[in-house]
Amino acid sequence: MKHLIPCLLFATIAAPALNAAEKLSYNRDVRPILSDTCFKCHGPDKANRKGKLRLDEREAALAKEAFVPGKPADSELVKRLHQSDPDEVMPPPDSVRQLTDAQKKIIAQWIAEGATYEPHWAYIAPKRSAPPTVTDKAWSANPLDAFIRARLDAEKIAPSPEADRPTLLRRLSLDLTGLPPTPAEIDTFVADTSADAYDQQVARLLASKHYGERMAVPWLDAVRFADTVGFHGDQNHNIFPYRDWVIGAFNRNLPFDRFTAEQLAGDLLPDADDSTRTASGFNRLNMMTREGGAQPKEYLAKYTADRVRTLGGAWLGSTLACCECHDHKYDPWGIKDFYQFGAFFADVKQWGVYADYGYSKNPDLAGYNNDYPFPPEIAVESPYLKAREASLRRERDQSAAAAAAKAGDALKAWRTEITTFITANPSGWQSAAVAAPKDDKAGFSVADAVVTISAKRDQDVTLRLTPAPGRVATLRLALARVKDATAGLDPKQGARVELKIAHKPATSDKAHGVSARLSGATVKKKDYRSGAEVLGVQTGWNLTTDMLKQDHAAVWVLDRPLTLADGDTIELTLVKNDLAGVTLSTSPLIPPTLDQPVFDAAWLARTANGAVDDALAYQWLAGTAADQDAFGKLKDLDREIAECRGGMAMTAVTEQWDPIAIRVLPRGNWQDENGEVVKPAAAHFLNQITADKPRANRLDLAQWLTGAENPLTARVFVNRVWAQFMGVGISATVDDLGLQGEWPSHPELLDWLAVEFREKGWDVKKLVTLIVTSKTYKQSAVQRPEILAKDPENRLRAMQSPRRLDAEFVRDNALAISGLLALELGGPSVKPYQPPNYYTNLQFPDRDYHAETDRNQYRRGVYMHWQRTFLHPMLANFDAPSRDECAVFRTQANSPQQALTLLNDPTFVEAARGWAVTLIASGGDDAAKLERAFRTALGRSATAEESGPLLKLLTKARAAYAMQPDQAGALLRTGLAPLPAEDQRVEVAAWTQLCRVILNLHETITRL
Amino acid sequence: MNKTPDPGPRTSDVLLRRAFLSRAAYGFGGLALAGLFGGTASADERWRGVITKPHHPVKAKRIIHLCMAGGPSHLETFDFKQALKDLHDKPFPDSFTKGQQLAQLQNTTLKARGPFTEFKKWGKSGQEISTLFPHLGSIADELCIIRSMHTEQINHDTAHAFMNTGSIIKGRPSWGSWMTYGLGSETQDLPGFVVMTSQGKGGGAQPVSARQWSSGFLPSKFQGIQFQSKGDAVHYVANPAGVDHSMQRGVIDEVNRLNGLLDARIHDPEIATRISQYEMAFRMQTSVPDLTDMSKEPKDVLERYGIKKPGDGTFASNCLLARRMAERGVRFIQLYHRAWDHHGDIEKNMPIAAEETDKASAALIMDLKERGLLDDTLVLWGGEFGRTPMGQGSGRDHHILGFSVALAGGGIKPGITFGGTDELGYKAVDHPVSVHDLHATMLHLCGIDHLKLTYRTQGRDFRLTDVFGEVVKPILA
């Protein structure tokens, strides 16, 4: 177990060893003691201050005669520390925090030296100091190294040698892209003798599109990005384009100041566009509720507080949660600062409860149920979906063309039929004769192909269509405005249209139900399922009174095209009918767009007389189902194409409305209306926003965060990036640079990096390059006794720290090694295998989980569906946060659940299996295969000590599976790939065991 | 207790020793290695909690929380109000409700709803319990009823969070996590904190989130592990299809052997931990099925709990599993029964929820008692809040100002009723007990001073009880 904050070490490592000759630093030596033990009662929090004494400000402490500078013996503070009377001694005996003798001495020495105060280091703008001179010139080229080496030299610890090249490239690849290097990439690097060989690798990996995926993960933690809303029913919301934006922003190296502005204020920028508006989805990542009985006002207060905490965590490295109720106990943040920050978000269009309940009316969201999205949203283009749609179309058309090429005369005959049909029906639609009713009870009449319905609303009406013999691929229903210019039975009401279709052959008494595989309509009231708009009209849809007055048609592509014989009928039942007039028609063709079901004349002419091309092949296959297998594939692909929604996706964004009043809520009580109404403003103890307008906005906030005077943002970000590559921040408390945070191990380095980052244009790739090209970074990760003795947490960086991969990359790495990984960039979240019934405790709506059945099964972890209330067990077991709250570091547990996941989760079993197949196919003897396996997974060769017993396990596994071939079969049914040929199964099953061993190794899931 | 089958040869012990020796030269301390050796789980092998010396005498070694999720009505369980009965269907006095928070009764006219059930005085103690709960009634002398609970959160999700973590800010550890963090585990073969859920058949189910058993900022090994009623009890605990026990052992042996070689090369203490985690994982693969296999439970035991089919995921079946976990040393066991959100049809549905839980709850307590486990097991029965004395159509709305819970076992004074609400059951007025007070009391019974169980993160020390909490001394035995 690695704890991030081993408090004891702070004193020994972060601060240099004390010696009496050296003058104390208030920030480094004294403040941590006072803050930890005294400020709680004698600090910034007015409400809890005891004896009206505050020790966090020198003037105030002097006014109360807390100490006499230069005279510790005469100082009340020192006396109190040494009192034996329990009523007098400080801290009080029942306080959890007590001072050690060494700490008491420090206080006395500090007073002796004049009791000087310094402002807290993190609240003063960072200053660049010149890198120290070090004797080893190799360590002075990169300023980072100079800072590190100078301290190591002072502590008399030698740095570690550079890691060997395979290790170095594996480290760099995993750190920059989250993917392991291929053996070929390692060979190239090892063989490259040029002086800049390493730098070239850095440049190559930074240019990889997978760099953005790697960098996005910690940012998505910080902004609490998830696919669901978190509270109560934890419904889905539409937000994946925001994730794609983050990945893209890192890839195109969007400067961090602009990165900040687009997220906080993408809607307010002068050059706002769909991309910046997508980024503004940041303001919509808070948890939301739709729970019945929730008080809108209470939840608006929760949303505001959540946003302020995230702002504090992601940008300011400050823990602001306590200020929701009271002034901070240690830091100068006050409760008013908290609500002033909250006021920046007062203009974000949102609802406290995303529903319209009788007891909490919400007319904006009338009709919303648990399947509805969380507005406001916009439709944006998704490059992933565009590309996927194009590729699926290609696949579909090529497959249809291949089938058509084999069809010969059948295709010709169909062509003749179609040409005849188009000649007879120039619109592409054949009006369907509706049999006149036998009696008045039918509730409708027919004239000029228009069906006029007289039955009462909500009664079933069945129509019998008698189309001419021939093919029917598509059925069309158009509204006929037969009553007061509306197609509805009641002009004051909308209509629900629900349709049942059946085919009754002339030779049979029974009608068979016919389903539709695709549908569409020119207009419809939108309907949703789990946050996503329902595609087409399915079996039913809703129309408003206005829609009933428009020209409107809906079409259904039948699940299988019908070939009607003479006398066959199609029975159409309008279930609980609300319509007054309809016309019906059929076609042997499929309209190219279902939402506009008209055939273009030129298109029809081509279909009738043009060359046989892919489009025609599609029409033939879809309209005849002549080739069973090809038709089955076409149906699947058509469905998947429809699901690409034309390459467009909805995404939650920030829209502005009139700011709601934000009050200071004493004790965080949302029902308390006595607090002052506040306007947006910066923290009172930092530089102020001086925008010349009545009310500062989110854009001003973004500019304030990344302004030259802001002391926190740059430090906070570079500290986190450092931690990402080194395992621990320069200040270990990456989430808190406040008074309770850790004094940095290398304060000048942290400041140098912060200034460099800001002055070089907030260039993230440049910052990363600086770190990963340093000698500090490139050191070996082999532990040495003298480091362990002097610096067990490796804060001085005399070596690299091994680090277990984060959850997503544990997955990516295994899939990459096995060769299964799908490397497409972006797109909707994906659902890998998950234990069944995991969402049983979710309701509103009930949730099911369908694991992906195509290559989406093997997408990268960053794209996994993030269900806040039930995070995927693999992610949770490897310490990924639920993303309910801003999280800027992940704990690194080492648990039996991790072992069970790697051993038994089907994803990892399938990876082992897939990898075994590849290894066997690549040939060579067992030893050669094992060698390849090691080089692929670990970037190195197996030692004899390693490979000997491994090969024995292989032999044992072969024997076991040869005895029980059914067990081999059972194992190899894991995953999506077809079962290997029977004579291969024992071998694949045996190698799968070996691959499982390698995928489970500590070394495999660790970057050294 | 059933005997665990022999997991096979333990080459790992040899490996661990080798890893240890290779590292000994580097002076690694005993901390990471403590308890890695030895074939069976011994006292040394358990995880150690941060509290090495209890602050108080330990009365309860483990806690079983029977969480009646959705919020059972106190007015039909443990808190009889004649005045409310008399006021039935009449306007609810404004003096009670003015300025108070309501859930679904926002903006409506408030009418009193009298209890629809009878109450009886049970046992020697004469405690008043509704006739919906005859089995709990029959063990009234074992129970301590608190009628003066109150909470701060009026919606399910946040109220559960408050009950579990003492806060509504996400990322705070659940009390089960605090317990295992503080006291460690008594078993090395099972998780220290286990959660099970069941759903009632009479409506009133509300979702419950895995957040409720999250370890928050505490290391994730302290998180609650949810046992599933279908499929593998613990995720990924079963071998892959086509991999038998001996094959799995062979794979793990090689993983551990190679990990030992890596340790000899780079000397990272995480590796020894990794090796021991694989051993524990392997043991769990046997101990979990052994735990959940109730086929050897005698018929009369099943009958006593009201179990039709062991392992069917009902509350009754989960109660029996809870006893088996208690026997095996699981520290904190939490059973959610999602059934109590009776906004409507309370007269029809609450009796169903009561029937689903009454018999099994009582059976669990008495079964523990007969096995000598009740002395050091604390059982808590209750929901995340109560329900309004005002009617909401045919039901009751959420209510936070007064509700009841029942306790039994580990250091609790049996056969007493503590505290009370006003005459209409609206507000806790006699010795109000906050959620923080309940937490402080439960920690106290476990030997922990709630002020001293802290974890430092985000620049300060956090406690389960935040900055509140008073031990409710009168209910201590």
Image (cartoon, grey):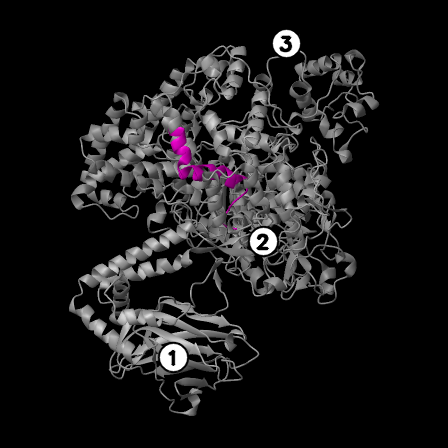
In this rendered view, identify the residue nearer to me: A197 or A742.
A197
Front position among marks 3 and 2? 3
Q: Residue furthest bottom?
A: A439
Instruction: Give the residue number, with chain letter if any, for mark 1.
Output: A584
Asked whether, in this view, residue A115 is left or right of residue A400, the answer is right
| Quadrant in the picture for residue A314 | top right
Specify the label residue A289 is tagged with. 2
Q: Alpha carbon of mark 1 to alpha carbon of mark 2: how far?
A: 44 Å
Asked if the magenta segment contains residue A458, the reply would be no
In this rendered view, identify the residue nearer to me: A345 or B12.
A345
Instruction: Give the residue number, with chain letter if any, for mark 3.
Output: A19
- Identify the magenta region: A201-228
Question: Considering only vertical position in the picture, is A140 above or below A888?
Answer: above
Front position among marks 1 and 2? 1
Give the mark, 1 or 3, whose residue is nearer the N terminus: 3
**What type is the residue that disc 2 sits on?**
Thr
Asked whether, in this view, residue A628 is left or right of residue A49, the answer is left
Specify the label residue A108 is tagged with. none
Question: Which secondary structure lies at badge 2?
Answer: loop
**What type is the residue that disc 3 sits on?**
Asn
Q: Residue A215: horizontal and vertical position, in percent?
A: 47, 37
**What type is the residue that disc 1 sits on?**
Leu
Question: Which secondary structure lies at badge 1?
Answer: strand
